[in-house]
Image (cartoon, rainbow, N blue to C red):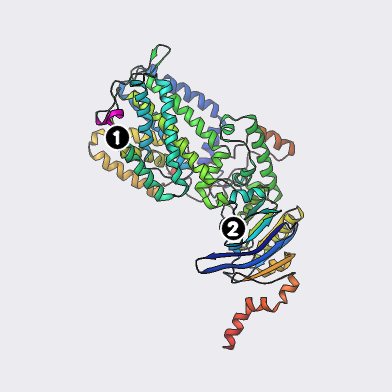
Amino acid sequence: MKFLRVKNITMQFGGLLAVDNLSFHVDKGEIVSLIGPNGAGKTTVFNVLTGVYKVTAGSMEFKGEKLEGKTPQEIVALGISRTFQNPRLFPKMRVIENVLIGTHIRTKYNFFDGLLRTKRFQYEEAEKTVRAIKILESIGLYEYMNSYAGSLPYGAQRKLEIARAMATDAELLLLDEPAAGMNPTETEELLRFIRELRDRGFTILLIEHDMKVVMNISDRIYVLDHGKLIAHGTPNEIVNNQRVIEAYLGGERKHAKN
Amino acid sequence: MNKTNIGKNSLLYNLEHFFDRYKVIFAVVFGIAAFSVPFLGLSRVTLRLLTMISLYTMLGMGLNVLIGYTGQVSLGHAGFYAIGAYVCALLQVDAGWSFWPALLAGGIFSAFVGFLLGLPSMRLSGTYLSIVTLGFGEVVLMILKQWESVTYGNYGIRNIPKPKLFGFTFDLQNGGFYIIILVLTILTGIFCTLIRNSKTGRAFLAIKEDEFAAIMMGINTSKYKILAFVISAFITGIAGGFYSVINNGYIEPTNFTFNISVLMLSVVIVGGLGTIRGMVCGAALLILFPEVFRFLQQWRFVIYGVLLVLMMQFRPQGILGWQSTLPYRLTKQTRKELEKLNLLPDEVKTPKAQGRGEYEIFKG
């Protein structure tokens, strides 16, 4: 049984084939990257995995559980959580509250427990808040705890998104271009952080544009172009793959020849 | 450290921390002042004004759960107000119920209707949802006017008895109305604060901030959007039931027109979206304004309109709508656990306000 197995998925929007018969898998404890030029369908894959879109055809399995047909809530509950290409925090909520939103799905007390401040509320609220603060501390956002998320510097916002995803008790983190808009120092730090996440037991599926990031960090890479898988393998195999070079650079060479 | 200390020397920071430090004293002083009002020998007009301010504070809080927390704008809350009032009044006049159970029944029935009106919120949002609520308010009004066999139509319900408790009759003159609504408003305030500081409140706010992100974090947004409708309708319905007995024992459909919905909305927006303190401020301003400027006669409504426009221009977050500079409130048990782990944040650490202009009201 694979940790995450995606088999022959196709996602069609009207006449547009965003993902075309794509298969891949992720093993537990791996860092796997999805790369490809703009519009290759990478984010669509994330949206299919997290239940935003209903897949047109194909099957997806996570820890032996089918993903297709499940709602986003059910998928988060199974242990898959994501970040977004552009940070989508709750800007007017505090940093700590943003992380607590992540724990929402694991918080079992109901509306009336909250209203009557029952023992169950007290216990769970303390447990989750401590957990949220521990997560913030572990990724270096502890001192921002009381700040409003929208006021954080960009790099910290990206980290906070990851913290929020971690708080859902996810085992598989889907990171959508985490290094986008970061300067080289921040990127360097992010790389270290993502490796740390893996060492802490998270499995990571990554979308990334920055080739340096991808080559540095990935155990395996899948390359998409126009929704189709054109190559996969270790970073070394990918850099030397003719089709990948064509997809990334080859177009230009063709134009030059014409 | 300096990352978190911005705004530390601002007036807002100092005021907020000052009030927070002595909050028990302020609460006691306010409580004594508020509850001694009936014994001050105030005129009927003043008592009526104070009662209306408190009533609109409660209405503001009810609507705030919907608009301020989940970001769903309702333009038809007079509908819930009317339902609460009519159910409460009819149960007393036609079924012989006493006031208290009738009041609760009005709130519960209103909450049920709120549930039904909340159902479209699963598919609609923003302007479209507002139009649905606008229609709802008008439909309720039409039903009240047309369904004469039950609602007495345009004639209205007459002879609604005054509330009694242990032989004591509440009326305007003895300050009884004022005391009832004061207690209801305080309870509502506590109710809203408890909701806000729990997982339910956080889910509400997350929906307002970014609904898609909230869904992706595993929040069942449909459920929470409907729940907000139910809570909001319940509070508004209770307020309506109270209104039915203070209006000289008489209500009619024209007490619940679109204007009332707009007034509630104005309370929320003028005071400060999403805050409790703002509701008190908004209600006080909007109820007192027409009285204070009575000498201007018809012109006061022009000025009223101009003031609203100016406020939207220069202080869109509402008069008291600032972001708190106080640290996040941890529950007692959380503090204990954090202390054990040596993770308890020191009180000095203050949040940074999000963007400038948060302190505008205190500048010059």
Is residue B272 rendered magenta in the image? no
**Left or right position of A253 against B122:** right
Instruction: Point out the frontmost of discs 1 and 2.
Output: 2
Give SS at disc 1.
Answer: helix
Kindly identify which residue carries mark 2.
A84
The quarter of the displayed image where residue B345 is located: top right
The answer, for residue B210, to whether it is visible in the render is no
Chain ID for label 2? A
Where residue B103 sits in the image (x, y, percent)?
41, 25
Q: Which residues are magenta?
A: B147-154
Q: Report the amino acid beneath label 2.
A: Phe
Image: A240 above or below B47: below
- Quote the CA–CA distance across marks 1 and 2: 49 Å
The answer, for residue B176, to whether it is visible in the render is yes
Where the C terminus of chain B falls, by quadrant?
top left
Q: Are marks 1 and 2 on the same chain?
A: no
**Left or right position of B56 against A229:** left
* Nearer the observer, B350 or B99: B99
Give SS at disc 2.
Answer: loop
Image: B124 above or below B190: below
